Image (cartoon, rainbow, N blue to C red):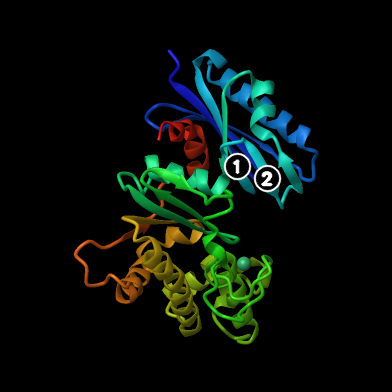
Amino acid sequence: MKKYTIGVDLGGTTITAGIVDEEFKVLHKCTCDTDLPQPEEVIEEKIANLCRQVLVESNLTLDDLLWVGIGTPGSVNSKTGVVDFNANFGYYDWELRDHMEKRLGCKVYIENDANAAAYGEFIAGGARGAKYAVVITLGTGIGGGIIIDGKIFAGFNYAGAELGHMVIQKDGRPCMCGRNGCWEKYASARALAEDTKAAMLSHPKNMMWQLVDGDITKVGAKTAFDGMAAGDELATQLINKFVEYVACGLTNVVNIFQPEIICIGGGVSKQGEVLLAPVRKLVNWEDYARDGKRRVTIKPAELFNDAGVVGAAWLGNQEKL
Ligand SMILES: [Zn+2]
């Protein structure tokens, strides 16, 4: 009986394919390098090879599969199966679904990678059980995925849910999207790391230098959290500011969507309550519906690196909605 699927997480650095069962468990994963830049055909071949490899290593065949789901960066039209535009890879109008169905000989679904990861958290992770959920990943940028009534919301042109590019500071820091003051320029893990570096450079005697052996290139988003834990004043200021930035964007998200659950993912979310407790306090304070009985729950994501694979694997269930 067909009861497995393959979820593929196509990233700019690596491609991962995983066998996922009906209980949304990842049974086995294979990974290869993306090695960009590459022509579309090479990426398709890499995905196909990875799918074959993960099947063989799991003692399964195509007959055991319901389908293959792929999460890919870019504006992804899940209906036509075409990646309209993928800036990182330099592709336009990539007919990924049809090409992969021909290569693999089975049904294929495709979706934007952040949406697929949000769907993973929704079916099997921190947003489980919520009808309305928003999943936010604080990473190099800020990725977002919106689930409304169990369905991935992507806008009429499949380019929606770009939460990281809402402006929280008019005429603020320039963003690669062309606007100034985008949320991800302040509240992403990278932004925190950059702010920490700048603060350390203007405070050459600060204790955070010891945390990175005097090497500025070792500064990451964790550095200021570690500094704060050690009682450093500058690090505490950096984290307080970061918390304000995160909460500002989150409050906007809450006021627009009022989701039941917001899941926060990405490396910094591993700081747990050190980050989430003050963020929650600010959002609860500023939320327009603060006097209401039913309030949004803000919690950490649970699947982390597997969210993309799990969500992609069960994209086929979206079709039934
Ligand atoms: Zn932007």
Q: Which residue is mark 1?
A: 77
Q: Quadrant of residue 68?
A: top right
**Numbered badge on residue 164:** none
Q: Quadrant for residue 261, please give it.
A: bottom left
Q: Quadrant of the C terminus?
A: top left
Identity of the residue drawn at 30% across and 76% down = 285
User: Is 165 rendered above or below residue 314?
Assistant: below
Image point (57%, 45%), residue name = 112
Mark 1 secondary-structure assignment: strand
Quadrant containing the N terminus is top left
Nearest to the observer: residue 227 or residue 241 = 241
Instruction: Give percent across and percent down for residue 197.
Output: 62, 76
Q: Pointers 1 and 2 in contact (CB under 8 A)?
A: yes
| Alpha carbon distance from label 1 to label 2 | 7 Å
Q: Secondary structure at mark 2?
A: strand
Query: Can residue 26 be seen from the camera position used here?
Result: yes
Residue at 22% from the left image edge and 68% from the top image edge? 292
Percent of width and height locating residue 224: 51, 73
Question: Could one spot residue 215 in this view of the protein?
Answer: no
Crowding around mark 2 (Cα neighbors within 10 Å: few <14, some 14 to 19, many 20+) is: some
Give percent across and percent down for residue 156. 54, 50
Closest to the observer, 99 or 125: 99
**Three-letter code for the amino acid on which mark 2 is drawn:** Asp
93 relative position to 59: left or right: right
Amino acid identity at mark 1: Asn
Query: Would you name the residue on which mark 2 appears?
Result: 84
* Position of 86 relative to 32 (above/below): below
On screen, residue 116 versus residue 286, left or right, reads right
